[in-house]
Image (cartoon, helix red, strand yellow):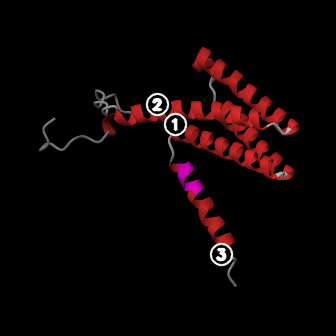
Amino acid sequence: MFGSSKSGASAYAKVGLETGVAAASPHQLIVMLFEGALTAVSAALGHMQAGETEKKGMAVSKAINIIENGMRASLDKEAGGEIAASLDALYDYMQRRLLQANLANDEAMLREVHALLADLKGAWDQIGAQQRAAPPKAPAAAAPSAYGSLAPRAPSFVSA
C-alpha cells in the first residue's frame, strides 16, 4: 500500500531541494551549484579509492555536468567582461582535469579540481556575507507608476 521508507525519504529530500531552489536567490543558486560540484568530486574520490569504477565515472560526470550546464551556462560573458572570460576558462580547465582524472584514475587531479571549486565557493560565500551585512538601501524616489492615475495613493490621514 505504501512505498518503502527509503523512497519516502528520497521524495521528501527531492521536494526539499526543489523548494530550496525555487526560493533561492541567484547568488544562492550559484553557491548550491558549487556545493553540488564539490560533493560530486568528493564522491568520485571516494569511489576511486574504493575501486568502484562505475560509480566514480558517474560522480565525475555529475561534476562535469554541474560545471558545464550550471556554472558555465550562468556566465554572462558580455556583461561580465574579463572576469566572466577568466571564469569560463577556469571552468573549462576543471572539466578537462576531471575527464583526465577519470581516465587516468588520478586522485591528485580530483583533489586539484576540488581545491579550485572550494576556493571559488569561498569567494561566493564572502560575497553573500557582504550582501547580508550591507545596510538595506533607502527606497528610491517614487517613480511614475505604470498605472497612472489608477495607482494606489496613501490615505489622506497618512502624512507623506
Q: Are marks 1 and 2 in contact (CB under 8 Å)?
A: yes
Mark sitting earlier along the chain (1/3): 3
Residue lying at the far bottom in this picture: please name it. 1
Q: Which residue is mark 2?
A: 127
SS for tag 2?
helix
Q: Foreground: 126 or 70?
A: 126
Q: Foreground: 95 or 74?
A: 95
- Look at the image and tell me in which quarter the C terminus lies: top left
Q: Residue at x 28, y 27 (%)?
A: 141
Q: Residue at x 74, y 49 (%)?
A: 46
Q: Residue at x 63, y 27 (%)?
A: 75
Q: Compared with residue 92, is residue 64 higher up or lower down, i.e. above or below?
A: below
- Secondary structure mostly seen in magenta is helix
Q: Compared with residue 117, is residue 152 higher up or lower down, i.e. above or below?
A: below
Q: Residues within 10 Å of mark 3 (few under 14, many from 20)?
A: few
Q: Residue at x 66, y 46 (%)?
A: 39
Label 1 to label 2, Cα distance in Å? 9 Å
Amino acid tagged 1: His
Q: Foreground: 141 or 112?
A: 112
Label 2 to label 3, Cα distance in Å? 39 Å
Q: Which residue is mark 3?
A: 5
Q: Position of residue 80 (x, y in %)?
A: 58, 20
The stretch in magenta equals 17-22
User: Which dot marks residue 76?
Assistant: none
Q: Residues within 10 Å of mark 2 (few under 14, many from 20)?
A: few
User: Which dot marks residue 27?
Assistant: 1
